[in-house]
């Protein structure tokens, strides 16, 4: 079975919901306790064995590139001024062997379009997608939980979480189907109204896909907002691949689902 070595992190969004805080600072760089939001998702990916982080970014997100790059000047200053203890914080050991790759998304055309921008880097491999907006705290990380399902069953897998009715319209909501002890997706609806939602199981921004998803993304047409939705590609995929696994994530706390507390 192929190892999941790459993760795609779409970060090109404007962060409109957080204006004015996001006027000059990418929302992914807003601090949560002592680290920018994006670092939690990168750590989650690296802890789950990912070796390459592919950011789908835009011209306003240069701060993210700088954050994951070395800053020799600062390191030298810290060293000279006897503040060496800060060096591992700005240059964590766990990122030393990680390759950070950046692909510019030319226009804001939705999550599906963002993910499609990574197709030339994925080849014929499984890969993870992490939406950093969903900052999820759990003993075993969400991506680790999904990876275990992937390695056990050798299928794509999507993380879901039970949410209250009022939140259905913020998420992709699935119609589940149980076969034995496994949960599969029968259908998925993007941001349904409470009366149209097929269940209370919402996609939480953690996915593992086979590269076949790119074939379906190519077929997706723009929606009413001129966006290409990942959910629509999943729907197309379900017409062919019946057994797309679902994992109900074991979560202690969602700190910022879509950054709405
Ligand atoms: C995206 C997806 C949605 C998913 C959500 C998780 O929506 O389209 O299916 O449930 O992420 O956060 P967005 O938050 O980008 O509007």
Image (cartoon, rainbow, N blue to C red):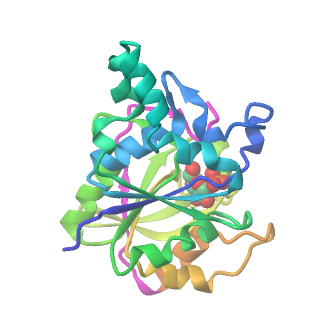
Residue 26 in view, yes or no: yes
Q: Which residues are magenta?
A: 240-261
Screen quadrant of the N terminus: bottom left
* Residue 214: image location, x then y, percent: 50, 79
User: Toward the viewer: 231 or 47?
Assistant: 47
Left or right of residue 11, residue 81 in this image: left
Residue, x 73% and y 76% (percent of image)? 222
Name above or below for residue 29 compared with residue 204. above
Horizontal side of residue 221 vs 8, given as left or right: right
Q: How many numbered marks does the figure carry? A: 0
Q: Give how far across and how far down residue 110 sits, in percent.
A: 68, 64
Task: Pick whichever, 237 or 118, lies toward us.
Answer: 118
Q: Residue at x 62, y 37 (%)?
A: 259
| 256 within the magenta span | yes
**Of the pair 168 and 153, the residue shown nearer to us:** 153
Residue 258 in view (yes/no)? no
Which residue sits at x=55%, y=68%?
Answer: 115
Left or right for 138, reference 200: left
| Above or below for 133 versus 209 | above
Compared across the picture, whether 35 is left or right of 18 comes to left
Residue 51: x, y in percent?
31, 57
Given residues 103 and 211, the one toward you in this image is 103
Q: Quadrant of the C terminus?
A: top right
- Rendered location of residue 18, percent (x, y): 74, 36
Residue 182 belongs to magenta span: no
Residue furthest top in the image: 82
Say which quarter of the image contains residue 217: bottom right
Name the quadrant where ligand 1 sits: bottom right
């Amino acid at each position: 079975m192929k190892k999941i070595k790459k993760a795609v992190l779409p970060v090109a969004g404007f962060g409109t919901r957080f204006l004015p805080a996001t006027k000059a600072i990418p929302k992914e760089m807003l601090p949560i306790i002592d680290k920018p939001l994006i670092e939690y998702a990168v750590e989650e990916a690296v802890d789950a064995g990912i070796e390459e982080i592919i950011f789908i970014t835009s011209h306003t997100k240069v701060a993210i590139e700088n954050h994951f790059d070395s800053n020799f000047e600062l390191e030298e200053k810290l060293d000279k001024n006897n503040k060496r203890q800060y060096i591992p914080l700005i240059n964590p050991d766990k990122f030393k062997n990680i390759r950070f790759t950046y692909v510019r998304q030319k226009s804001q055309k939705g999550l599906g379009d963002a993910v499609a921008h990574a197709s030339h880097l994925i080849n014929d491999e499984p890969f993870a997608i992490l939406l950093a907006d969903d900052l999820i705290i759990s003993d075993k990380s969400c991506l680790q939980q999904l990876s275990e399902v992937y390695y056990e069953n050798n299928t794509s897998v999507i993380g879901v979480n039970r949410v209250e009715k009022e939140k259905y319209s913020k998420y992709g909501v699935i119609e589940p189907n149980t076969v034995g002890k496994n949960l599969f997706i029968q259908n998925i609806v993007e941001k349904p109204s409470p009366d149209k939602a097929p269940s209370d199981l919402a996609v939480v921004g953690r996915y593992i896909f086979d590269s076949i998803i790119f074939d379906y993304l190519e077929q997706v047409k723009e929606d009413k907002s001129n966006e290409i939705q990942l959910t629509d590609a999943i729907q197309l995929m379900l017409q062919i691949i019946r057994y797309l696994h679902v994992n109900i994530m074991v979560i202690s706390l969602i700190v910022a689902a879509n950054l709405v507390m």
